[in-house]
Image: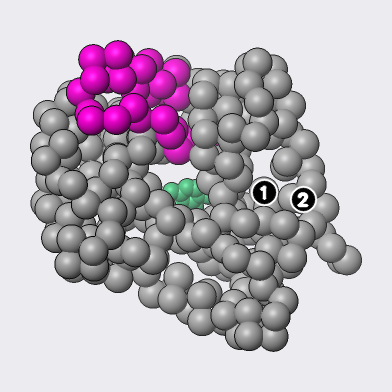
Amino acid sequence: MLNLIAERLRVIRQRLGAAARRAGRDPATVTLIGVAKGQPVAALREAIAAGLAQLGENYVQEWAQHRAALSGAAERGSRPEVNWHFIGHLQTNKARRLVGQATLIHTLDSPRLADELEKRAAAAGLVQPVLIELNVAGEANKAGLPPDELPAFLDALNGLSHLEARGLTVLPPAAPEAEAVRPWFRAVRELRDALNRKNVYRQALTELSMGMSGDFEVAIEEGATLVRIGTALFGERS
Ligand SMILES: *Cc1c(COP(=O)(O)O)cnc(C)c1O
């Protein structure tokens, strides 16, 4: 089908804008990230050509493949600039490959990973923007920091000058319908607001990375500033 992805992008942007307005928010305060995992390069290219400027990657290896394939297009002068977001579980031994390459790392979830990222960012002479991923429901099979450890973790991050925490990421427990996850999104926003009021971290946490294909409108109504959308934009993953 011709321009299927461009059409889906248009519809998602429309839904995103409507959700923002329902919440009295400016749609420009919500950034759409296209989640590239399991997607063919042709689909990514089509979305970029249609104006998508942010891509999210879960795996360092697949990310490298996508970048290599898309940079061919850049040489031919047809690729606008893409910002890369790392949204997958990050192992400490891969941290070095992300620092300075990812616009934003959404999945900082342990003091050990923070120390490693700090070390790599310091060595590269840069400040790496990060989000802290929370495991809100204490799910054993999921990554993320327990919310009750967040204040102490943020206090420790105050001492790491080469990391800049911008906000929080959450993947709520799977639910049959989007409304069921609203309380999780709301709780994360309220937690963020409370931490900001107490100035626990050295700067305000402004970003909330929450919402995927099935629940991004609810997430936006609850304050999401970054939504991560894969299948609704690119179709089913291989
Ligand atoms: C795969 C993935 C997404 C996208 O999920 P869809 O349901 O396809 O939109 C978003 N966030 C993370 C962390 C993911 O791993």
Is 65 inside the magenta-drawn segment? no
Q: Which circle marks residue 232 in the picture?
A: 1
In this rendering, the answer to whether 183 lies above or below 56 is above
In-image side of 153 versus 99 (left or right):
left
Per the image, label 1 sits on a secondary structure element best described as: helix
Asked where in the image residue 221 lies, by quadrant, the reply is top right
Q: Position of residue 209 (x, y in %)?
A: 45, 38
Task: Name the image quarter holding residue 126.
Answer: bottom left
Task: Determine crowd level at label 1: few under 14, some 14-19, many 20+ residues with C-alpha closer than 10 A.
Answer: some
Magenta residues span: 184-212
Q: Does residue 93 show up?
A: yes
Label 2 belongs to which residue?
8
Instruction: Please give left or right for residue 61 compared with residue 14 in the image.
Output: left
C-alpha gap between disc 2 and disc 1: 7 Å
In x, y percent, where is residue 30? Answer: 59, 35
Q: Nearer the viewer, residue 136 or 140?
A: 136
The spot of residue 173 in percent (x, y) is 40, 33
Quadrant where the C terminus is found in the figure: bottom right
Q: Is mark 1 within 8 Å of ligand 1?
A: yes
Q: Amino acid at mark 2?
A: Arg
